[in-house]
Image: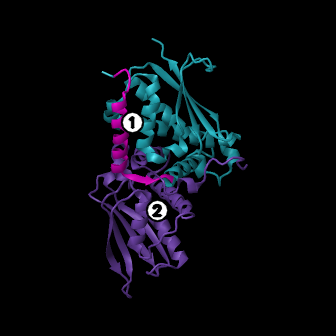
Chain colours: A purple, B cyan
Protein backbone atom coordinates (compact mmCIF):
# COMPACT_ATOMS: atom_id res chain seq x y z
CA UNK A 1 0.00 0.00 0.00
CA UNK A 2 1.30 3.47 -0.82
CA UNK A 3 -0.23 6.70 0.38
CA UNK A 4 -1.89 8.82 -2.28
CA UNK A 5 -1.33 11.98 -0.28
CA UNK A 6 1.69 13.21 1.60
CA UNK A 7 1.27 12.76 5.34
CA UNK A 8 4.87 13.84 5.93
CA UNK A 9 8.24 12.17 5.65
CA UNK A 10 11.08 11.48 8.08
CA UNK A 11 12.73 14.63 6.69
CA UNK A 12 9.75 16.63 8.02
CA UNK A 13 10.57 15.41 11.53
CA UNK A 14 14.36 15.18 11.51
CA UNK A 15 15.98 18.25 13.05
CA UNK A 16 12.74 19.43 14.67
CA UNK A 17 12.50 19.27 18.42
CA UNK A 18 10.24 17.94 21.13
CA UNK A 19 10.55 18.00 24.89
CA UNK A 20 12.70 15.18 26.29
CA UNK A 21 10.11 14.92 29.03
CA UNK A 22 7.74 13.19 26.59
CA UNK A 23 10.19 10.31 26.10
CA UNK A 24 11.15 10.30 29.77
CA UNK A 25 7.53 9.83 30.78
CA UNK A 26 6.91 6.97 28.37
CA UNK A 27 10.14 5.01 28.93
CA UNK A 28 9.14 3.61 32.35
CA UNK A 29 5.99 2.09 30.78
CA UNK A 30 8.13 0.43 28.11
CA UNK A 31 10.49 -1.02 30.74
CA UNK A 32 7.55 -2.20 32.86
CA UNK A 33 5.91 -3.88 29.88
CA UNK A 34 9.13 -5.70 29.00
CA UNK A 35 9.70 -6.79 32.60
CA UNK A 36 6.19 -8.24 32.73
CA UNK A 37 6.55 -10.22 29.52
CA UNK A 38 10.22 -11.16 29.41
CA UNK A 39 13.04 -12.29 31.63
CA UNK A 40 15.21 -9.39 32.85
CA UNK A 41 18.00 -10.49 30.48
CA UNK A 42 15.61 -10.52 27.53
CA UNK A 43 14.11 -7.19 28.55
CA UNK A 44 17.56 -5.63 28.58
CA UNK A 45 18.30 -7.06 25.14
CA UNK A 46 14.93 -5.72 23.93
CA UNK A 47 15.82 -2.21 25.07
CA UNK A 48 19.13 -2.45 23.22
CA UNK A 49 17.42 -3.89 20.18
CA UNK A 50 14.87 -1.04 20.05
CA UNK A 51 17.56 1.61 20.25
CA UNK A 52 19.71 -0.15 17.63
CA UNK A 53 16.80 -0.14 15.22
CA UNK A 54 16.13 3.54 15.94
CA UNK A 55 19.80 4.31 15.31
CA UNK A 56 19.71 2.35 12.05
CA UNK A 57 16.74 4.39 10.77
CA UNK A 58 18.29 7.60 12.03
CA UNK A 59 21.48 6.97 10.08
CA UNK A 60 19.49 6.97 6.85
CA UNK A 61 19.14 10.72 7.35
CA UNK A 62 21.88 11.69 9.74
CA UNK A 63 25.45 11.85 8.46
CA UNK A 64 27.81 11.98 11.47
CA UNK A 65 30.75 14.33 11.04
CA UNK A 66 32.97 13.19 13.93
CA UNK A 67 35.74 10.69 13.31
CA UNK A 68 36.87 10.28 16.92
CA UNK A 69 34.99 7.81 19.12
CA UNK A 70 34.07 10.14 21.98
CA UNK A 71 33.18 13.05 19.69
CA UNK A 72 30.99 10.71 17.69
CA UNK A 73 29.10 9.60 20.79
CA UNK A 74 28.72 13.20 21.90
CA UNK A 75 27.38 14.08 18.46
CA UNK A 76 24.85 11.27 18.77
CA UNK A 77 23.74 12.35 22.23
CA UNK A 78 23.48 15.99 21.16
CA UNK A 79 21.24 14.93 18.33
CA UNK A 80 18.92 12.68 20.28
CA UNK A 81 18.55 14.43 23.62
CA UNK A 82 21.73 16.01 24.88
CA UNK A 83 23.88 14.64 27.69
CA UNK A 84 27.44 14.73 28.82
CA UNK A 85 29.62 11.68 28.24
CA UNK A 86 33.22 11.30 29.40
CA UNK A 87 35.49 8.30 28.91
CA UNK A 88 38.29 6.40 30.58
CA UNK A 89 40.46 3.81 28.85
CA UNK A 90 40.63 0.80 31.17
CA UNK A 91 42.83 -1.46 29.09
CA UNK A 92 45.09 -1.14 26.03
CA UNK A 93 46.24 -3.94 23.74
CA UNK A 94 49.92 -4.67 23.08
CA UNK A 95 49.93 -2.08 20.29
CA UNK A 96 48.67 0.59 22.69
CA UNK A 97 45.22 0.68 21.15
CA UNK A 98 42.25 1.04 23.50
CA UNK A 99 40.71 -2.35 24.17
CA UNK A 100 38.30 -1.67 26.98
CA UNK A 101 36.82 1.78 27.39
CA UNK A 102 34.44 3.04 30.03
CA UNK A 103 31.92 5.69 28.97
CA UNK A 104 30.44 7.59 31.87
CA UNK A 105 27.21 9.45 31.20
CA UNK A 106 27.15 12.41 33.58
CA UNK A 107 23.67 13.53 32.55
CA UNK A 108 21.67 10.45 31.55
CA UNK A 109 18.28 11.59 30.28
CA UNK A 110 16.76 8.11 30.49
CA UNK A 111 17.62 7.61 34.15
CA UNK A 112 15.85 10.83 35.06
CA UNK A 113 12.66 8.95 34.28
CA UNK A 114 13.32 5.89 36.42
CA UNK A 115 11.38 6.54 39.60
CA UNK A 116 8.20 4.64 38.83
CA UNK A 117 9.55 1.44 37.36
CA UNK A 118 8.81 -1.85 39.03
CA UNK A 119 11.58 -4.35 39.67
CA UNK A 120 14.03 -2.04 37.99
CA UNK A 121 16.94 -3.47 39.92
CA UNK A 122 16.77 -6.58 37.74
CA UNK A 123 17.97 -4.76 34.62
CA UNK A 124 20.29 -1.91 33.77
CA UNK A 125 17.71 0.79 33.26
CA UNK A 126 19.50 2.84 30.61
CA UNK A 127 20.68 -0.13 28.50
CA UNK A 128 19.02 1.55 25.54
CA UNK A 129 21.98 3.94 25.41
CA UNK A 130 24.43 1.06 24.91
CA UNK A 131 22.34 -0.10 21.94
CA UNK A 132 22.50 3.34 20.34
CA UNK A 133 26.26 3.63 20.88
CA UNK A 134 27.09 0.08 19.79
CA UNK A 135 25.13 0.36 16.56
CA UNK A 136 26.67 3.72 15.74
CA UNK A 137 30.25 2.61 16.44
CA UNK A 138 29.86 -0.52 14.31
CA UNK A 139 28.18 1.38 11.50
CA UNK A 140 31.03 3.90 11.42
CA UNK A 141 33.64 1.12 11.52
CA UNK A 142 32.02 -0.35 8.41
CA UNK A 143 32.25 3.03 6.70
CA UNK A 144 36.00 2.95 7.39
CA UNK A 145 36.13 6.61 8.33
CA UNK A 146 37.04 6.39 12.01
CA UNK A 147 40.50 7.46 13.16
CA UNK A 148 40.66 4.49 15.51
CA UNK A 149 40.73 1.50 13.15
CA UNK A 150 38.67 -1.01 15.15
CA UNK A 151 36.74 -3.83 13.46
CA UNK A 152 33.83 -3.92 15.85
CA UNK A 153 32.61 -2.61 19.18
CA UNK A 154 30.56 -4.34 21.85
CA UNK A 155 28.94 -1.95 24.32
CA UNK A 156 27.26 -3.02 27.56
CA UNK A 157 25.68 -0.99 30.32
CA UNK A 158 27.12 -1.97 33.67
CA UNK A 159 25.61 0.60 35.97
CA UNK A 160 22.61 2.93 35.84
CA UNK A 161 21.45 5.78 38.03
CA UNK A 162 17.94 4.49 37.36
CA UNK A 163 18.92 1.40 39.39
CA UNK A 164 20.28 3.49 42.22
CA UNK A 165 23.90 3.34 41.05
CA UNK A 166 26.03 6.45 41.43
CA UNK A 167 26.75 6.81 37.72
CA UNK A 168 25.61 5.51 34.36
CA UNK A 169 28.49 3.51 32.91
CA UNK A 170 28.74 1.76 29.57
CA UNK A 171 31.71 -0.52 28.85
CA UNK A 172 32.94 -0.73 25.29
CA UNK A 173 35.17 -3.56 24.08
CA UNK A 174 36.91 -2.93 20.77
CA UNK A 175 38.05 -5.72 18.45
CA UNK A 176 40.82 -5.04 15.91
CA UNK B 1 -10.85 29.96 41.58
CA UNK B 2 -10.79 29.58 37.81
CA UNK B 3 -11.56 32.77 35.88
CA UNK B 4 -14.44 33.01 33.43
CA UNK B 5 -12.48 34.29 30.46
CA UNK B 6 -8.82 34.74 29.47
CA UNK B 7 -8.18 38.45 28.89
CA UNK B 8 -5.66 39.96 26.46
CA UNK B 9 -3.10 40.57 29.21
CA UNK B 10 -3.12 36.91 30.27
CA UNK B 11 -2.81 35.92 26.63
CA UNK B 12 0.17 38.20 26.27
CA UNK B 13 1.77 36.69 29.38
CA UNK B 14 1.11 33.18 28.07
CA UNK B 15 2.73 34.06 24.74
CA UNK B 16 5.90 35.11 26.54
CA UNK B 17 5.74 32.28 29.06
CA UNK B 18 5.41 29.51 26.47
CA UNK B 19 8.45 30.79 24.59
CA UNK B 20 10.48 31.04 27.76
CA UNK B 21 9.50 27.54 28.83
CA UNK B 22 10.36 26.13 25.42
CA UNK B 23 13.69 27.92 25.33
CA UNK B 24 14.66 26.50 28.74
CA UNK B 25 13.35 22.99 28.10
CA UNK B 26 15.56 19.98 27.46
CA UNK B 27 14.79 18.94 23.91
CA UNK B 28 15.21 15.89 21.72
CA UNK B 29 14.95 15.19 18.03
CA UNK B 30 11.36 14.78 16.93
CA UNK B 31 12.25 12.04 14.44
CA UNK B 32 13.90 10.02 17.22
CA UNK B 33 10.73 10.40 19.29
CA UNK B 34 8.55 9.19 16.41
CA UNK B 35 10.98 6.30 15.84
CA UNK B 36 10.70 5.38 19.51
CA UNK B 37 6.95 4.97 19.07
CA UNK B 38 7.41 3.01 15.84
CA UNK B 39 10.02 0.62 17.25
CA UNK B 40 8.17 0.19 20.54
CA UNK B 41 5.07 -0.97 18.66
CA UNK B 42 7.19 -3.32 16.55
CA UNK B 43 8.79 -4.79 19.67
CA UNK B 44 5.44 -5.16 21.45
CA UNK B 45 4.11 -6.89 18.36
CA UNK B 46 6.98 -9.40 18.41
CA UNK B 47 6.30 -10.14 22.06
CA UNK B 48 2.53 -10.40 21.52
CA UNK B 49 2.83 -13.06 18.83
CA UNK B 50 2.36 -10.71 15.91
CA UNK B 51 -0.76 -8.94 17.21
CA UNK B 52 -0.19 -5.46 15.75
CA UNK B 53 -3.54 -4.04 16.87
CA UNK B 54 -2.93 -5.02 20.48
CA UNK B 55 0.64 -3.73 20.33
CA UNK B 56 -0.56 -0.33 19.05
CA UNK B 57 -3.38 -0.23 21.63
CA UNK B 58 -0.97 -0.83 24.49
CA UNK B 59 1.23 2.07 23.40
CA UNK B 60 -1.87 4.26 22.97
CA UNK B 61 -2.84 3.60 26.60
CA UNK B 62 0.69 4.12 27.86
CA UNK B 63 1.11 7.35 25.93
CA UNK B 64 -2.24 8.70 27.11
CA UNK B 65 -1.30 7.96 30.70
CA UNK B 66 2.10 9.65 30.22
CA UNK B 67 0.35 12.68 28.75
CA UNK B 68 -1.67 13.10 31.93
CA UNK B 69 1.49 12.93 34.02
CA UNK B 70 3.06 15.46 31.66
CA UNK B 71 0.21 17.94 32.03
CA UNK B 72 0.13 17.50 35.79
CA UNK B 73 3.75 18.63 35.88
CA UNK B 74 2.67 21.79 34.02
CA UNK B 75 -0.53 22.43 35.89
CA UNK B 76 0.94 25.22 37.99
CA UNK B 77 1.74 27.15 34.77
CA UNK B 78 -1.55 26.22 33.10
CA UNK B 79 -3.46 27.54 36.13
CA UNK B 80 -2.10 31.00 35.39
CA UNK B 81 -3.89 31.15 32.06
CA UNK B 82 -6.86 28.82 32.48
CA UNK B 83 -10.49 29.84 32.20
CA UNK B 84 -13.65 27.75 32.19
CA UNK B 85 -14.92 29.16 28.92
CA UNK B 86 -14.81 26.32 26.37
CA UNK B 87 -13.76 28.80 23.67
CA UNK B 88 -10.56 29.43 25.63
CA UNK B 89 -9.64 25.75 25.60
CA UNK B 90 -8.29 26.15 22.06
CA UNK B 91 -5.89 28.79 23.33
CA UNK B 92 -4.78 26.62 26.27
CA UNK B 93 -4.37 23.63 23.92
CA UNK B 94 -2.15 25.65 21.62
CA UNK B 95 -0.01 26.81 24.53
CA UNK B 96 0.29 23.18 25.70
CA UNK B 97 1.26 21.97 22.22
CA UNK B 98 3.83 24.76 22.00
CA UNK B 99 5.28 23.58 25.30
CA UNK B 100 5.74 20.08 23.85
CA UNK B 101 6.84 20.77 20.26
CA UNK B 102 7.81 24.43 20.21
CA UNK B 103 6.80 26.66 17.30
CA UNK B 104 6.89 23.71 14.89
CA UNK B 105 3.70 22.33 16.42
CA UNK B 106 1.76 24.25 13.75
CA UNK B 107 3.22 21.99 11.06
CA UNK B 108 1.45 19.05 12.66
CA UNK B 109 -1.58 20.61 14.35
CA UNK B 110 -3.20 23.49 12.56
CA UNK B 111 -5.55 25.96 14.28
CA UNK B 112 -7.80 24.10 16.65
CA UNK B 113 -11.43 25.13 16.22
CA UNK B 114 -14.17 25.02 18.83
CA UNK B 115 -17.69 24.26 17.62
CA UNK B 116 -20.47 24.85 20.15
CA UNK B 117 -23.19 22.23 20.61
CA UNK B 118 -25.86 24.71 19.45
CA UNK B 119 -24.01 25.70 16.30
CA UNK B 120 -26.47 25.10 13.42
CA UNK B 121 -23.72 23.33 11.43
CA UNK B 122 -22.89 20.99 14.28
CA UNK B 123 -24.71 17.79 13.33
CA UNK B 124 -23.76 15.87 16.46
CA UNK B 125 -25.09 18.60 18.79
CA UNK B 126 -22.15 18.03 21.13
CA UNK B 127 -19.46 20.58 21.97
CA UNK B 128 -16.46 19.64 19.90
CA UNK B 129 -12.92 20.65 19.00
CA UNK B 130 -11.78 20.11 15.42
CA UNK B 131 -8.13 19.94 14.55
CA UNK B 132 -6.70 19.58 11.05
CA UNK B 133 -3.45 17.60 10.76
CA UNK B 134 -1.51 18.87 7.73
CA UNK B 135 1.32 16.39 8.38
CA UNK B 136 1.09 13.37 10.62
CA UNK B 137 3.77 12.90 13.25
CA UNK B 138 3.08 9.18 13.42
CA UNK B 139 2.62 8.32 9.72
CA UNK B 140 5.79 10.22 8.78
CA UNK B 141 7.91 7.65 10.57
CA UNK B 142 6.31 4.44 9.29
CA UNK B 143 5.97 5.00 5.55
CA UNK B 144 8.52 2.29 4.73
CA UNK B 145 6.53 -0.35 6.63
CA UNK B 146 3.67 -2.43 5.27
CA UNK B 147 0.94 0.20 5.60
CA UNK B 148 -1.76 -2.28 4.59
CA UNK B 149 -1.23 -3.84 8.02
CA UNK B 150 -1.28 -0.50 9.80
CA UNK B 151 -4.26 1.19 8.17
CA UNK B 152 -6.85 -0.39 10.49
CA UNK B 153 -4.86 0.08 13.68
CA UNK B 154 -5.71 3.81 14.01
CA UNK B 155 -2.01 4.29 14.55
CA UNK B 156 -2.42 8.07 14.82
CA UNK B 157 -4.44 7.51 18.00
CA UNK B 158 -1.13 7.11 19.82
CA UNK B 159 -1.03 10.90 19.62
CA UNK B 160 -4.72 11.76 19.52
CA UNK B 161 -5.65 9.62 22.53
CA UNK B 162 -2.91 11.38 24.45
CA UNK B 163 -4.33 14.76 23.43
CA UNK B 164 -7.81 13.65 24.47
CA UNK B 165 -6.40 12.54 27.79
CA UNK B 166 -4.79 15.98 28.24
CA UNK B 167 -8.07 17.67 27.43
CA UNK B 168 -10.01 15.52 29.89
CA UNK B 169 -7.58 16.34 32.67
CA UNK B 170 -7.82 20.02 31.85
CA UNK B 171 -11.62 19.95 31.87
CA UNK B 172 -11.57 18.21 35.24
CA UNK B 173 -9.35 20.92 36.63
CA UNK B 174 -11.65 23.60 35.24
CA UNK B 175 -14.67 21.94 36.89
CA UNK B 176 -16.21 21.31 33.48
CA UNK B 177 -17.87 17.94 33.73
CA UNK B 178 -17.31 16.33 30.35
CA UNK B 179 -15.76 13.13 29.16
CA UNK B 180 -13.85 13.26 25.88
CA UNK B 181 -14.41 11.00 22.90
CA UNK B 182 -11.81 11.30 20.16
CA UNK B 183 -12.34 10.34 16.52
CA UNK B 184 -9.94 10.47 13.60
CA UNK B 185 -12.49 11.58 11.03
CA UNK B 186 -9.89 11.96 8.28
CA UNK B 187 -6.77 9.84 8.07
CA UNK B 188 -3.98 9.70 5.48
CA UNK B 189 -3.88 5.92 5.73
CA UNK B 190 -7.55 5.72 4.78
CA UNK B 191 -6.93 7.88 1.71
CA UNK B 192 -7.79 11.33 3.08
CA UNK B 193 -5.83 14.33 1.77
CA UNK B 194 -5.23 15.50 5.36
CA UNK B 195 -5.77 14.24 8.86
CA UNK B 196 -8.61 15.49 11.03
CA UNK B 197 -9.16 14.83 14.69
CA UNK B 198 -12.45 15.67 16.38
CA UNK B 199 -12.82 15.65 20.14
CA UNK B 200 -16.43 15.39 21.27
CA UNK B 201 -17.42 16.42 24.78
CA UNK B 202 -20.04 14.28 26.48
CA UNK B 203 -21.65 15.67 29.60
CA UNK B 204 -20.90 13.49 32.59
CA UNK B 205 -24.01 12.23 34.34
CA UNK B 206 -24.52 12.84 38.04
Q: Secondary structure at mark 2?
A: helix
Q: Quadrant of residue A103?
A: bottom left
Q: Residues within 10 Å of mark 1 (few under 14, many from 20)?
A: some
Q: Is residue B159 left or right of residue B187?
A: left
- Report helix, strand or loop for mark 1: helix
Q: Is residue A95 above or below residue B52?
A: below
Q: Residues within 10 Å of mark 2 (few under 14, many from 20)?
A: many
Residue A167, percent across and down? 29, 59
Q: Quadrant of residue B28?
A: bottom left
Q: Disc 2: which chain? A: A
Q: Does residue B58 appear anywhere in the picture?
A: no
Q: Quadrant of residue B81?
A: top left
* Image position of A106 with respect to B8: above or below: below
In this view, which residue lies farthest toward the top? B206
| Chain identity of mark 1 | B
In the image, which disc is placed on residue B71?
Answer: 1
Along the line of sight, which residue is nearer the eye, A144 or A66?
A66
The magenta span reads B3-30
Can residue A109 be spotted in the picture? yes
Report the mark closest to the observer, 1 or 2.
Answer: 1
Q: Where residue B165 appears, x then y in whole percent? A: 47, 32
Task: Work out whether residue A89 or residue B3 is closer to the camera in this orientation and state it.
Answer: B3
Say whether residue B26 is magenta. Answer: yes
Q: Position of residue B129 (x, y in %)?
A: 53, 28
| Residue farthest toward the bottom in the current orientation of the protein | A95
Q: Residue at coordinates 35% horizontally, 50% vertically from top-left? A: B23
Residue A21, placed above or below residue B6: below
User: Relative to A138, is A38 above or below?
Assistant: above
Q: Which residue is mark 2?
A: A132
Amino acid sequence: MTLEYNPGTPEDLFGKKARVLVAQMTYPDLVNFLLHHRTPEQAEEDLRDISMRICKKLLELWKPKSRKVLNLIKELLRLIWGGNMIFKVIQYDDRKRPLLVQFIDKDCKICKSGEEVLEVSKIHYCSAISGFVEYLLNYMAQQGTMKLKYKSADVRTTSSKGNGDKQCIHFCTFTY
Amino acid sequence: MVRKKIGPFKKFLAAIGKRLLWWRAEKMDLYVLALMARETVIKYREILNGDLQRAANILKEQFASSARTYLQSFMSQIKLIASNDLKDITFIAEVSLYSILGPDYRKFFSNIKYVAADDPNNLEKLHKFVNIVPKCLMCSAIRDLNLEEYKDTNYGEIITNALASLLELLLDYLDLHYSVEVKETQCFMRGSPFGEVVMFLHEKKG
